[in-house]
C-alpha cells in the first residue's frame, strides 16, 4: 500500500477529485469492492433545501470540500446530510452510499 500525500494548493479541482477518490474507495469497501450507483428515481426524489447557518448543519460539502453559504440551494439525503445538488448527483451516479455515514439509497437494477 502506497500513501501519496502530495499537497496541491493552487488547484481546487484536483483537490476535490482527490477527495472523491478517497470517499469512493471507502464506499467500495462497504459495497464489496465495487461502487453501486443509486437509482435515478431515488436521485430525483431527494429533497431540496436552502442552507441556513443557524440550523447548525455541517457547513461544508464533503465532496467538493467547499463551505456552504447562507441562502444556497442544497440537496438533502434521507440521512439528513446535505450536499451541493451537482456534487451529490455526480456522486450518486457512482455510489448509492452517503459519503459521510454510508446510508444507502435504492441501487440501480
Ligand atoms: Zn459540493
Ligand atoms: Zn449521511
Image (cartoon, rainbow, N blue to C red):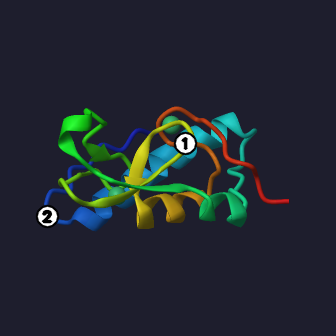
The tag earlier along the polypeptide, 2 or 1, is 2
- Where is residue 63 shown, x and y percent of the image? 39, 52
> What residue is rendered at 30% in x and 36% in y?
57
- Estimate the spatial distance between the alpha carbons at disc 2 and disc 1, rounded to whole Å: 28 Å
Can you tell which mark lies on residue 98? 1
| Label 2 CB-ligand 1 distance < 8 A | no
Mark 1 residue CB less than 8 A from any atom of ligand 2: yes
The quarter of the rendered structure image containing the C terminus is bottom right
The number of numbered badges drawn on the structure is 2
Q: Is 107 displayed left or right of 42 in the figure?
A: right
Give the mark toward the camera: 2 or 1.
1
Q: Is residue 31 left or right of residue 79?
A: right
User: Which quadrant would residue 42 be assigned to in this image?
Assistant: bottom right
Along the line of sight, which residue is nearer the eye, 86 or 4? 86
Question: Which class describes the residues within 10 Å of circle 1: few (<14), some (14-19), or many (20+)?
Answer: many
- Which residue is located at x 78 percent, y 59 percent? 108
* Left/right of residue 40 with respect to residue 9 in the rendered view: right
Which residue sits at x=72%, y=52%? 36
> Residue 79 or 37: which is nearer the viewer?
79
Percent position (x, y) of residue 91?
Answer: 53, 58
Helix, strand or loop for disc 1 = loop
Whole-percent x and y of residue 51? 28, 51
Q: Residue 74 occupies which quadrant of the picture?
A: bottom left
Q: Is residue 46 above or below residue 82?
A: below
Of residues 17 and 80, the one drawn nearer to the viewer in this rendering = 80
Quarter occupied by residue 49? bottom left
For residue 10, which numbered disc appears in the image? Answer: 2
- Around disc 2, counting alpha carbons within 10 Å, would you say few (fewer than 14), some (14 to 19), or many (20 or more)? few
- Asked if one can make out residue 5 in the rendered structure from this viewpoint, the answer is yes
Query: Badges 2 and 1: C-beta atoms under 8 Å apart?
Result: no
Amino acid at each position: 500500500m502506497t500513501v501519496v500525500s502530495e499537497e496541491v494548493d493552487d488547484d481546487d479541482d484536483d483537490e476535490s477529485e482527490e477527495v472523491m477518490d478517497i470517499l469512493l474507495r471507502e464506499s467500495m469497501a462497504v459495497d464489496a469492492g465495487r461502487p453501486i450507483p443509486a437509482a435515478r428515481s431515488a436521485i430525483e426524489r431527494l429533497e431540496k433545501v436552502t442552507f441556513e447557518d443557524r440550523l447548525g448543519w455541517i457547513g461544508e460539502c464533503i465532496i467538493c470540500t467547499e463551505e456552504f453559504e447562507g441562502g444556497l440551494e442544497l440537496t438533502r439525503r434521507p440521512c439528513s446530510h446535505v450536499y451541493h445538488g451537482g456534487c451529490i448527483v455526480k456522486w450518486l451516479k457512482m455510489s448509492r452510499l452517503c459519503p459521510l455515514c454510508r446510508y444507502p439509497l435504492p441501487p440501480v437494477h
